[in-house]
Amino acid sequence: MNDALSSAPAQGALRILSAGPGVTLQDAGRHGLLRFGVTGAGPMDPLAFALANRVAEVPEGSAALEISMGGVELEAVDAPVTVALAGGAFRIALDGQPVPAAARLTLQPGAKLQVRPGSVGAWCYLAPSGRIDIAPTLGSLSTHTRSGIGGPAGRALAADDVLPLAGPKVLPGGTMEILAPFLARGGDTIRVVLGPQDDYFSLAEIAAFLAGPWTISVRSDRMASFLDGTPLTHAGGFNIVSDGIAHGAIQVPGEGYPVVLMADRQPTGGYPKIATIIGADLGRMAQLRPGTVIHFAAVSVEEAVAARRAEAADLATGWSLAPLVRTDLSSDFLLGCRLIDGWVNALAP
């Protein structure tokens, strides 16, 4: 455990009780440093991350827990705090009682919150209604484990880590379901803009790339999604002068299998990039699990911009909060409630 995180101040904290692999702290990312060889990191699913922060009523880009399919269990320390969860269809339980996959709830000190993988999705975001009060690295809390920077000493979260919170808040309404239809990003087609090195491939190979099918490999992680399928053939060799790598760039190394570069991508690369996933589809790509079969569709830059604007509109006004209606009340719970406060004998005079 990192000593810097070992004691919680009076204003409150989150304590990690257990964490599977790949559970990290991520904020909006470490920007402006790629030219120095520093990867930006940040969330795998920017849309779900942004929604969790917005529902938690914290500034845009604030640090949140990014929860992998390894899952996490945590509790509040010293003071109650409201948290918002959004992402894939994870199984969430508060003290053993199920909670919707997208929800806002208040953790009382000692209450146990469990987040486990569910039917679909690879990432879930937990945003506290308060600032995670640990020192940033190069201006960001985002964790990049390969270079050992960000988060708690550059590593993933682990049992007994304590994350101090500055100004934790209790938001009104109790447990609320987040109604956000735009999080249900179904379909197996990922939109891309061709290039910047699509001229390294013949028109037939570009058509084969778009048609697929491609299967997401079990080797995939925060750095890249590796795709299995029929390998592509380069028309002009497979080495280029190394240049910058954008989030979502799709490299094709010499063996011909596309590699989608994700949040923890390397700053530069020397293989031709046949296409780049549009910003509005980055989260959908990230939420697909290994074994999923996908295809690509080429769109124009104008279409990509329009999709990004539609996503921003969804984030601004396309969600709401609804009180949670409990339907799983046990007989023991009901017997413990004061549903009546007396009785009347109808036969009495």
Image (cartoon, grey):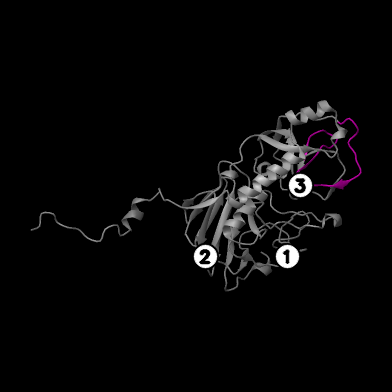
Q: Which mark is residue 247?
A: 3
Between label 1 and label 2, give the one nearer the viewer: 2
> Label 2, label 3: how many angstroms apart (C-alpha)?
35 Å
- Residue farthest to the left, as pictured: 349
> Label 2 neighbourhood size at 10 Å, few (<14), some (14-19), many (20+)?
many
Q: Which residue is mark 2?
A: 170
Q: Earlier in the sequence, mark 1 or mark 2?
A: 1
Instruction: Specify whether residue 340 is in view.
Output: yes
Residue 163: quadrant of the picture:
bottom right
Label 2 residue SS: loop
Label 3 residue SS: loop
Residue 121's x, y, as percent?
61, 43
Q: Residue at x 62, y 50 (%)?
A: 315
Region rendered in magenta:
234-259
Residue 152: quadrant of the picture:
bottom right
Between label 1 and label 3, give the one nearer the viewer: 3
> Label 1, label 2: how many angstroms apart (C-alpha)?
25 Å
The answer to whether residue 17 is above or below residue 267 is below
- The secondary structure that most of the magenta stretch takes on is loop
Residue 345's x, y, as percent?
14, 56
- For the residues bearing labels 2 and 3, Cβ distance under 8 angstroms: no
> Label 3 neighbourhood size at 10 Å, few (<14), some (14-19), many (20+)?
many
Q: Earlier in the sequence, mark 2 or mark 3?
A: 2
Q: Amino acid at mark 3?
A: His
Q: Is residue 324 left or right of residue 68?
A: left
Instruction: Specify whether residue 280 is in view.
Output: no
Residue 37's x, y, as percent?
84, 55
Q: Is residue 333 left or right of residue 148?
A: left
